[in-house]
Image (spheres, helix red, strand yellow):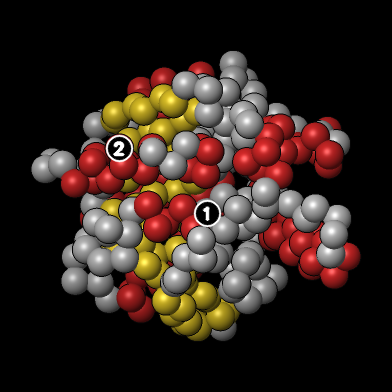
Amino acid sequence: MTVAFETLRFEIDGVETVVKAIGQGPTLLYLHGAATLEGFDFAAGLADRFRVLCPSHPGFGFSGDAPDVSGMTDMVLHYLNLLDRLALPEPPHLMGFSMGGWMASELAGLAPERFGKVVLVSPAGLNDPAYPATDLAAVQPQALPAYLSHDPSVALGYFPDGSDEAAAQRFGADRAREGAAVGRLTAPFGMGHPNLARFLRRIRQPALVVWGTNDRLLPAGQADLWAAALPDAHVLLEEGAGHLILQERPDVLQRIGDFLDEAS
């Protein structure tokens, strides 16, 4: 099934920023992870209740390059500027996945008044040594799908199957481009911030932490650490799901929507 998105374009500090939008209702701003290979089709599962805005980060996906971005602070500023341009009638809910969860945490921690509820899906950023993240540099490319989803066939659907050489080349070029952008973002501290818990303590609106119990990239044991740092935390653990939980278990979207719909 092809998901029909509206495409919005903004120039933010000289960077063309493309936002894919779908649905009607209260606004939900979604921040993707360290790659865009899985796309945004999952958002159709929330579009009956929310207007979901899915921007590509500068240097990722549909947006333009941003060689001047040199850390997460630059990305947080980018999204505050995008919010100014969007001029929404009320603060949007905020949802971040993986690296986007780290991004959402800093964004909501610095400007909590700009957002409604917060959803963090398999978030990166805390870097607790008791629950170490997998070093992707040590994972062979052919093994990567099994790290992204508990059922490898789910992740494999987002990789070239070898039948189209041009598509495989585009896929490789996209991943190299996004990998370079991730390298600039993580140059200061790696995939996270040593003081991220301080940001989390400033997020006083209800926050939902969503994790698959079989996540091989970021262990679900971290969920308790996030919940302990967030003043009003709720945790949703999905048994047998991997890192790409929104794609592997789309029924989770119903429960995320219910959380966002609940009166605070």
* Residue positioned most to the top: 130
Q: Quadrant of the rendered structure where residue 199 is?
A: top left
Q: Quadrant of the rendered structure where residue 24 is?
A: bottom left
The residue drawn where x is 62% and y is 41% is 154
* Residue positioned most to the front: 1
According to the picture, the residue beneath numbered tag 1 turns out to be 32
According to the picture, the residue beneath numbered tag 2 turns out to be 255
For the residue marked with disc 2, what is the amino acid? Answer: Arg
The residue drawn where x is 57% and y is 31% is 242
Q: How many marks?
A: 2
Element type at mark 2: helix
Please say if 192 is above or below 211: below
Please indicate whether residue 8 sits to the left or right of residue 177 in the image.
Answer: left
The x, y position of residue 211, in whole percent, is 46, 30
For the residue marked with disc 1, what is the amino acid? Answer: His
The residue drawn where x is 38% and y is 37% is 252
Q: Quadrant of the C terminus?
A: top left
The x, y position of residue 15, in whole percent, is 57, 79
Comparing 73 with 6, the one in front is 6
Question: Is disc 2 surrounded by few (<14), some (14 to 19) or many (20+) residues within 10 Å?
Answer: few
Please say if 234 is above or below 172: above
Residue 101 in sight from this viewpoint: no
Which dot, 1 or 2, sits closer to the camera? 2
Please say if 223 is above or below 2: above
Please indicate whether residue 140 sits to the left or right of residue 11 in the image.
Answer: right
